[in-house]
Image (cartoon, rainbow, N blue to C red):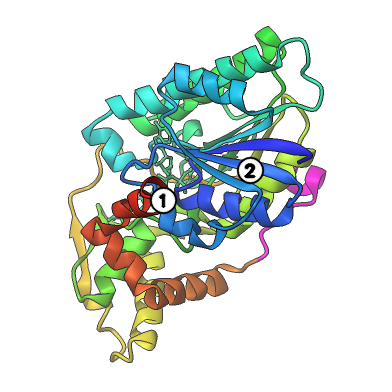
């Protein structure tokens, strides 16, 4: 094998798309997927890779420094794509501590392990930290986040991600660790845990349950198809300049309420329901505490320097996404019943 690449959080939503891309695209690289399989980790996202000779799954927690050090001793890891994190804002408001331990301490454990393993030879090494546009805070109706926008995180989730970004940069400036960081906007697509807006809305509409809209539904997010994010991660991992930050976004801003209306129209069509049936489920609920008004990314740097741009228009991406959730009813049922958590035992422990 030419290289050994450690991907953390590979059983999650975005991580699973990155693992699949790397395993299939780089058959001469050993891809190690390290994941603690929290509630958000679902190995059933990757059943198609079970027999791939260049793929290894390791169940481990990035909060455990000894385990992470041992992994770097066991394998000749040359690159890290770090996606493991607690990722849901509402959970961070309810229970912030897991965000502090995983997103901050877990990231430092990885930085320390890479630093120890690579000291004296940073040649050909790369520590890639995947982050969010939420570190920049909240925009008014105008303007965009650029790579030099000051950090202004406002939820425990975004504050923990901001801390980890600062620490990754600090390891570059202090120890010379070869790092690269990206900050991406909201992702959507197959395999997203149905606590996030789009899969939650699709599932609720399907079963004629209320669609909860926080506040007035006027908050704005920039949406990117997850496969396009995975493509960007591949480009930055291989060609991004050491020490640099790249913003990734879909050039695709929507208020929550117009996004939900669009989803409702698609669902009416797909479910053969009378127009307006799904929209009747829209239910305004209490707003999220400290709800950021608007996120909008200026992704021209990655476009200009690495030639990346989104491949899918939103209309096409949403259509594909709805189809995926409707076609993968068992995936959704196993998530909503908790059954998916048994997969690891059956596949990796009993064998
Ligand atoms: P996710 O919640 O779907 O997946 C996170 C994965 O990390 C899960 O598989 C989980 O088991 C694993 N994990 C959590 N704690 C762990 C720990 N202590 N040790 C090892 N593994 C652990 O998240 P996602 O939406 O796929 O996001 C992945 C990354 O991308 C995160 O770092 C997130 O901040 C970032 N990001 C997400 C979005 C988005 O819209 N989802 C946008 C920009 C950036
Ligand atoms: P979410 O998918 O949780 O992503 P983030 O908070 O990281 O942007 O939420 C997207 C937007 O949708 C956000 O403005 C909150 C809103 N939202 C709802 O209105 N209802 C819901 O049930 C959820 C989960 C989110």
Q: Which residues are magenta?
A: 298-311
Residue 137 in view (yes/no): yes
Question: Which quarter of the rendered image does ligand 1 occupy?
Answer: top left
Name the quadrant containing residue 129: top right
For residue 53, above or below residue 1? below
Residue drawn at (81%, 42%) of the image: 305
Frontmost residue, 107 versus 113: 113
Residue drawn at (68%, 9%) of the image: 175
Frontmost residue, 84 versus 252: 84
- The secondary structure type at the circle numbered 1 is loop
Residue 83 belongs to magenta span: no
Can you tell which mark lies on residue 31? 2
265 left or right of 179 in image: left
Q: Estimate the spatial distance between the alpha carbons at disc 1 and disc 2, rounded to whole Å.
A: 21 Å
215 left or right of 130 in image: left
Q: At which x and y percent is residue 284? A: 20, 60
Residue drawn at (41%, 50%) of the image: 351
- Residue placed furthest toward the top: 174
Name the quadrant containing residue 149: top right
Q: At which x and y percent is residue 10? A: 51, 45
Residue 188 in view (yes/no): no
To which residue does mark 1 refer? 351
Q: Earlier in the sequence, mark 1 or mark 2?
A: 2
For residue 122, above or below residue 144? above
């Amino acid at each position: 094998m030419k290289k050994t690449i450690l991907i953390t959080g590979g059983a999650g939503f975005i991580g699973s798309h990155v693992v699949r891309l790397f395993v299939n695209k780089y058959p001469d690289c050993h891809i190690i997927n390290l994941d603690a399989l929290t509630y958000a980790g679902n190995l059933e996202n990757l059943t198609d890779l079970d027999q791939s000779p260049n793929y290894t799954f390791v169940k481990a927690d990035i909060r455990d420094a000894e385990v992470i050090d041992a992994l770097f001793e066991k394998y000749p890891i040359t690159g890290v794509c770090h996606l493991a994190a607690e990722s849901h804002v509402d959970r961070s408001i309810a229970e912030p501590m897991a965000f502090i331990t995983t997103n901050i301490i877990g990231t430092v454990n990885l930085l320390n392990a890479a630093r120890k393993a690579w000291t004296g030879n940073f040649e050909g090494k790369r520590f890639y930290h995947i982050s969010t546009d939420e570190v920049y805070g909240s925009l008014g109706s105008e303007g965009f986040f650029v790579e030099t926008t000051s950090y202004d995180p406002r939820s425990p989730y975004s504050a923990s991600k901001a801390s980890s970004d600062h620490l990754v940069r600090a390891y570059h400036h202090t120890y010379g660790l070869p790092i690269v960081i990206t900050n991406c906007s909201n992702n959507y697509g197959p395999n997203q845990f149905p606590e996030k807006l789009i899969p939650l809305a699709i599932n609720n509409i399907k079963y004629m349950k209320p669609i909860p809209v926080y506040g007035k539904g006027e908050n704005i997010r920039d949406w990117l198809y997850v496969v396009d994010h995975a493509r960007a991660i591949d480009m930055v991992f291989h060609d991004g300049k050491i020490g640099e930050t790249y913003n990734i976004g879909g050039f695709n801003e929507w208020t929550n309420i117009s996004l939900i209306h669009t989803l409702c129209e698609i669902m009416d069509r797909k479910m053969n329901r009378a127009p307006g049936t799904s929209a009747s489920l829209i239910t305004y609920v209490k707003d999220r505490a400290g709800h950021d008004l608007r996120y909008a990314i200026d992704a021209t740097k990655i476009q200009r320097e690495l030639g990346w741009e989104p491949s899918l228009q939103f209309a096409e991406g949403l259509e594909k996404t709805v189809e995926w959730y409707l076609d993968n009813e068992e995936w959704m049922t196993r998530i909503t019943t908790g059954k998916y958590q048994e997969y690891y035992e059956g596949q990796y422990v009993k064998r």
